[in-house]
Image (spheres, rainbow, N blue to C red):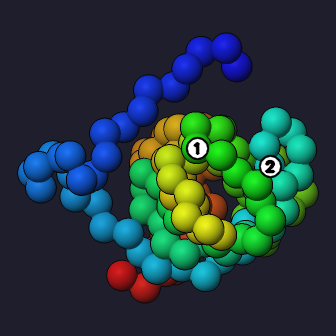
Amino acid sequence: MSQRLARLPSIHTLKPAERRREGRHPSRHGVVVRCDAALRGSAWLIDISPYGCALWGRGLALRCGVVVTLRPIEAPHSAETDLDAIVRWIREDTAGLEFLRPLTGSAKRPAAVWQAIVSESPP
């Protein structure tokens, strides 16, 4: 990938009205994390929304700006459930990811599995 992806402004520089209003749902689902087709390891979703998620995992060696692929542990051999996201922030073993395409609407997306994860997570 030779094209740089746009960086979102920090929430600390945005006015409250400019921040996303979509709530995040706590989650405890396991995911497999891949980067450049190489397995990085497994992690736990901490929270999820239609636009992104936070995950926790030891030794993932992620960097901000890197595109990763997430796959639910419930479907380890199903590439149809893969979801691409960009790493927006990292703090120790926790990372914030923004989905490249929101989990809303399109039947061509692996949205059904991921929307089920969002709906199973308590508000």
Q: Residue 54 carries which label?
A: none
Residue flagged by tag 2: what amino acid is it?
Arg
Q: Looking at the figure, which quarter contains the C terminus?
A: bottom left
- The residue shown at (48%, 66%) is 48
Q: What residue type is labelled 1?
A: Cys
Residue found 65% across the figure and 69% down from its top: 93
2 lies above or below 10: above
Tell which of 77 and 89 is nearer to you. 89
Say which residue appears at 43% left-offset and 85% top-offset. 122
Determine crowd level at label 2: few under 14, some 14-19, many 20+ residues with C-alpha closer than 10 A.
Answer: many
Residue 55, percent from left and from top: 60, 67
Residue 34 versus residue 108: which sits nearer the camera?
34
- Residue 35 drawn at (x, y percent): 78, 43
Q: What element carries label 1?
A: loop
Residue 99 against residue 108 in the figure, above or below? below
Separation (CA) of disc 1 from disc 2 = 15 Å
- Residue under the image location 42 percent in, 75 percent down: 25
Return the x and y of residue 85 as percentages of the image width and height: 59, 44
Quadrant location of the N terminus? top right
Q: In this view, does 97 lie above or below 37?
A: below
Determine the image quadrant of residue 86: top right
User: Residue at the bottom extreme?
Assistant: 122
- Which label is found at residue 34? 2
* Percent x, y of residue 84: 64, 43
Q: Can residue 109 be seen in this view?
A: no
Residue depth check, mark 1 versus mark 2: number of the one nearer the observer:
1
User: N-terminal of the two: label 1 or label 2?
Assistant: 2
Q: In the image, 1: left or right of 18?
A: right
Disc assigned to residue 64: 1
* Numbered disc 2: secondary structure: strand
